[in-house]
Image: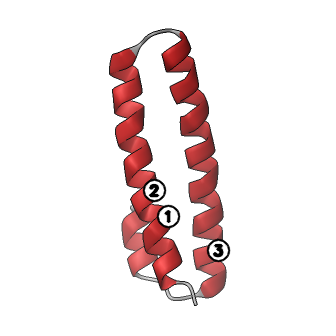
Amino acid sequence: MEAREEVEQTSDVAQLGRLLQGNRAKQDALFQQLAACFDARDLAAAKDLATQLIYQDRLQQAIRDKMP
């Protein structure tokens, strides 16, 4: 199931917490990859990673909005 759908289909606080934690881990990994891309001056890959980070940030906000 896609992450966004999973967020939309649950109201369980524990599940939302797990989703938030998993999202943070994905963001951390993406930031590390982004740093490596900048070090390697691979701007095309950096652009793709930045797009993924924007999605993850919006997903994180959606999760937080559903949490009490």
Which of pointers 3 and 1 lies earlier in the amino acid sequence? 3
Q: Which amino acid does label 3 sit on?
A: Gly
- Residue 50 percent location from the top left of the image: 40, 37
Determine which of the numbered discs, if any, sits on residue 17 in the image. 3
Residue highlighted by disc 1: 60
Residue drawn at x 33%, y 19% as measured from the top left: 44
Q: What residue type is labelled 1?
A: Gln
Quarter assignment of residue 30: top right
Residue drawn at x 61%, y 58% as measured from the top left: 22
Q: What residue type is labelled 2?
A: Asp
- Residue 5 percent location from the top left of the image: 37, 71
Q: Is residue 3 left or right of residue 16?
A: left
Residue highlighted by disc 2: 57
Q: Callout 3: helix, strand or loop?
A: helix
Between marks 3 and 2 in the image, the one whose residue lies nearer the viewer:
2
Residue drawn at x 62%, y 85% as measured from the top left: 13
Q: Are dots 2 and 1 in contact, CB under 8 Å?
A: yes
Quarter assignment of residue 18: bottom right
